[in-house]
Amino acid sequence: GESVGLHLPTLSVQEGDNSIINCAYSNSASDYFIWYKQESGKGPQFIIDIRSNMDKRQGQRVTVLLNKTVKHLSLQIAATQPGDSAVYFCAETNQAGTALIFGKGTTLSVSS
Amino acid sequence: GAGVSQTPSNKVTEKGKYVELRCDPISGHTALYWYRQSLGQGPEFLIYFQGTGAADDSGLPNDRFFAVRPEGSVSTLKIQRTERGDSAVYLCASSPGLLSYNEQFFGPGTRLTVL
């Protein structure tokens, strides 16, 4: 599978590969993190979230890992499919806990 | 069920004009958010409503931007004297309550183009 150690704006994988998308966040006091998927012309769609008292959470084909020591978040997608092609954003709560701060997006392209 | 809806889906206006963008949140959601997304960037927070009141408007870029939610449901984002730099997709989101304990659901956005 493909993996990236640092944030990259694009990631290209083959169908069936595992994908790993990385994100660095800024606020060490954030207690809630979310990954969103955004397809062209649509609003962001919730994928998975994790709270700061956890370091791993699994969903259907997706896993989020949180490393609070280095303020790093990653999204793992198993058996990537063409329908997974989109821009992926990580987000954290702002200091007031009233809104989300979005990271730089990663465009995932899945080829058959 | 019905998600967050936004109207219009596209708005083209001329520099200096006034525009209103509407958001219909999911029924029963008390929290409503407005974000702005420029091309190639992630959404940027503008304003957050809890019920009828603006609980956090720290993201509004200047006093040309204003938003209301008079009955605690539908919200309108108002932009006066539009500038070309206001061109972006304006996203609305709603959640059942306090952000850290509730998922935000986003609408499809309104694409604003200022000529």
Image (tube, rainbow, N blue to C red):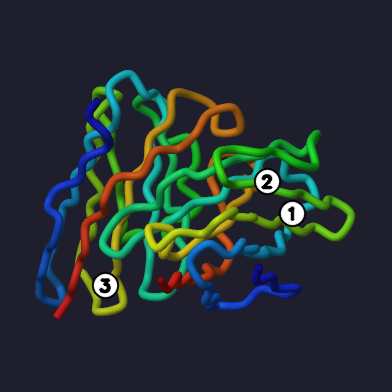
Pointer 2 indicates a residue of which chain?
A
User: Who's the residue at 70% across and 38% down the image?
Assistant: A57
Badge 1 density bin: few <14, some 14–19, many ≥20, Cα 10 Å: few
Q: Measured along the vertical axis of the image, is residue B16 above or below residue B50? A: below
Amino acid type, label 2:
Gln
Same chain letter for marks 2 and 3: no
Question: The C terminus of chain A appears in which quarter of the rendering?
Answer: bottom left
User: Who's the residue at 61% across and 40% down the image?
Assistant: A49
The answer to which image quadrant residue B112 occupies is: bottom left
Percent across and percent down for residue A45 are: 41, 47
Q: Mark 3 points at which residue?
A: B87
Q: Mark 2 points at which residue?
A: A95
Percent across and percent down for residue B31 are: 42, 30
Check residue A27 in the rendering and tell me which mark sits there, or answer none. Answer: 1
Amino acid type, label 3:
Ser
Q: What element carries label 3?
A: loop
Structural distance between the alpha carbons of marks 1 and 3: 29 Å
Q: Is mark 1 on a helix, strand or loop?
A: loop
The answer to whether the residue labelled 2 contacts the one labelled 1, judged by CB atoms less than 8 Å apart, is yes
Percent across and percent down for residue A34 are: 59, 46
Amino acid type, label 1:
Asn
User: Of callouts 2 and 1, which one flags the residue occurring earlier in the amino acid sequence?
Assistant: 1
Q: Is mark 2 on a helix, strand or loop?
A: loop
The answer to whether the residue labelled 2 contacts the one labelled 3, judged by CB atoms less than 8 Å apart, is no
Check residue A19 in the rendering and tell me which mark sits there, or answer none. Answer: none
Q: Which of B12 and A103 is in front in this view?
A: A103
User: Who's the residue at 37% across and 71% down the image?
Assistant: B38
